[in-house]
Every structure is written in C-alpha cells, then in structure tokens.
Image (cartoon, grey):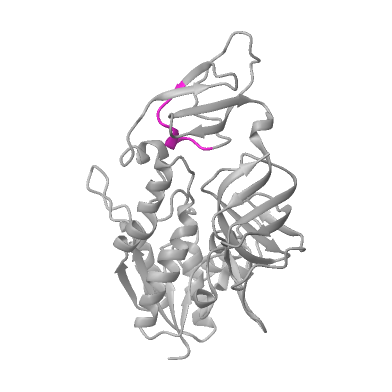
Amino acid sequence: MNNSVVVGLSGGVDSSVTALLLLEQGYDVRAVFMKNWVETTPGGECLWEQDVEDAMQVCDTLGIPLNTIDLSRAYWDGVFAHFLEEYRNGLTPNPDIVCNQEVKFKAFRDHVVELGASHLATGHYARCTKSDSGWMLQRGLDPNKDQSYFLCMLTQRQLEGTLFPVGAMLKSDVRKLAARAGLGTHAKKDSTGICFVGERPFREFLAQFLPVSPGEILDTDGHVIGEHEGVHFYTIGQRSGLGIGGIAGRPDAPWYVAAKDPATNTLIAVQGNHPLLFSRSLRTAPASWIAGQPPAQELTLAAKTRYRQPDQECTIEPESDGTLLVHFATPQRAVAPGQYAVFYLGETCLGGAMITGAES
C-alpha cells in the first residue's frame, strides 16, 4: 500500500487534475468527497449536490473509485463555531486557514490513515518538499493562484505524506490538461466565498447566526455620522456598505472603517488615507511554525496580513508564550484582528499566527 493515495476530490478542476496526474505517475488512486456543509436552500436544493455529481463524472472518466465522507460535525465544531465566536468578539476570522488545519489535514487525514493509504493529495497550489531538517511548505508556482497562505498552520506531521501535484503548474495549464483528458470540470468556475459554505450574500448569511444589532458610526471627534447593523458585520478598512452620505463641511470622499468597539457596538470611520488606517507593528496569538520552531530573530522576513497582498518586509520578536510582535519596514493599511500574518523566507512559507492587534 506504499503507493496508495487518497485524493480529496471537491468536484473542481484542480482536484480533478490532481487525481489525473497521480494516476499518470503510477499511484494507486482513490477519491473521497468531503461533505462538510449540509445546508439546503429554501427550495430544498442541496448546495453540494452538483459538486458530488461533477466528482462522480471525473472518477468515471479516470476509472477510479469515489466515496463520500460526512465531516460536517468536524467542520461545525472545529471551524464554524470558532468562526461565529470570533465575529461576536468583533474580529474578522479566516475560516479557510482553520478548515485546512482542523478538517482537511486533521479529520480527513485521519480518515485517509484509517483507509490504509500512504498519501493524502489535494488540489492546493502549493509545494511540499523534504529537506535535511524536515518537511517544507513552498509557494505554488503560479503566483496568481498560490495557496500557501491558507496552509500556514500545518505541522510536520500534517505535511508528511501530503502531495500537492498542481502546485508546480500554472492554472492555465491545469485547465488545458483537464480538457485534453476529457474531464468535465475543465471549464468549471473556481469556487469562492467561505470554505465549504460557498458563494452567497455574506451579511445575509451571517445574519442567520448572529443578530442584527444597530449602533452608531462615529468620526474621530465622536460625532455620529451614520448607523450600522452590528459591528460583527464589518471589518477594518471596509468601504462598502457603510451608508454614510454627504456630510456638511466634510470632503466628498469615501469613508472607511478604522476601528470597531464591540463593547459599545460602535464603529469609527475615517476618510482617505487617514493615519488610523495604518500600522507599523502588529501583535499575534501564539504562532505555528512549520519547522516546529521560530526562525532566527535577526532574519528579515516577508509577511502577508491578507491573501493576495504583496510581500511586506518585516522582522519578528517572539515572546516567551509563543506570541509575536511583528515590525514592518513600511506602514500596513487596514490590518484586521482575526486575520492571519503569514511569514515567508524566499519561496518557503515558515508559518503563521492570528493577528490580535495592531500598533501605529
């Protein structure tokens, strides 16, 4: 069974090509579809049914078996309950990072081990390599699709036996290969939105679980300039959805959320590139380092405080409890507590940590 691999087949083109590549490389390939969200629409439609059908068609084309595993309880307990609690506390969580940590590479990985397979494979755009010091996570070759940011909390144990076959490919080449192989997913639109929950009006979705709680929007002088629906519906740097109209004596310029106060249920809004939107440093929760230990403090690293952000030069100061103080070479705009700071040295993702606060 040393050549056996279980592919997490989502019904998308990336995991489809993952299975195809592994077959071509001589692996004994099986596919498993993870059912992690069981909600139906008001009309009774199961939101994951089309993805299952697409996964079945891919497996029929490739001649590999497909099974389904229900991990909805693991997703709710390990990801979604945490997601809601952080929103209640005024944070802006990143469920995709937690989902990889707790579901795809924990609950699902345990299932793969139970099946007796030697490898787990997914369609992530990242690369996993072995060095003398252990497993390393590297950026995906396609800079526009690199997903190492979302894998920053993985451990040595989780990376061992993990394969990312499309991580060394461009997305355009993945689609071409899928088309040549006759895979019906070759032109399927990439999924967006909350991990496993999918695309939907976000505030409307969140309001199913968190109450609408109107409060005041204030300017930096404490003047009321608008009303919001609850601080948990907004994030630092947000522009849309504030509903602030023209205000006498103020420039006709966009307003942005600069601060949130869950205790008083108020937002602070500013205009333009206001200093309150920028931070030279940030603090984090205890960090997770892929190598098992932090890098040398004297190293200059690159960091991202949100996905798709260009690399930002920084240095770190680890505290005794594992938390970090991160200093940036240039001020960072709209650092949002609850999101993750992810650290890189060249092409290697070193790890990450949840942001707990920012400092000017």
The image quadrant of residue 276 is top right
Quarter of the N terminus within the rendering? bottom left
Percent across and percent down for residue 67 are 31, 73
Residue found farthest to the top? 248
Q: Is residue 182 visible?
A: no
Front residue (pair 4, 264) = 264
Residue found farthest to the bottom? 1
**251 in magenta:** no
Residue found farthest to the left? 44
**229 in magenta:** yes
Quarter of the C terminus within the rendering? top right
Q: Is residue 339 left or right of residue 56?
A: right
Front residue (pair 330, 161) = 330
Residue located 37% across and 60% down the image: 78
Taking 163 as reference, is 101 above or below it? above
Residue located 43% across and 50% down the image: 194
Percent across and percent down for residue 145 are 60, 58
Taking 83 as reference, is 264 above or below it? above
Q: How many marks?
A: 0
The image quadrant of residue 137 is bottom right
Front residue (pair 286, 49) = 286
Residue found farthest to the front? 320
Percent across and percent down for residue 57 are 37, 68
Q: Is residue 50 left or right of residue 148?
A: left
Q: Which residues are magenta?
A: 227-235
Q: Is residue 134 visible?
A: yes
The image quadrant of residue 236 is top right
Percent across and percent down for residue 146 are 61, 60
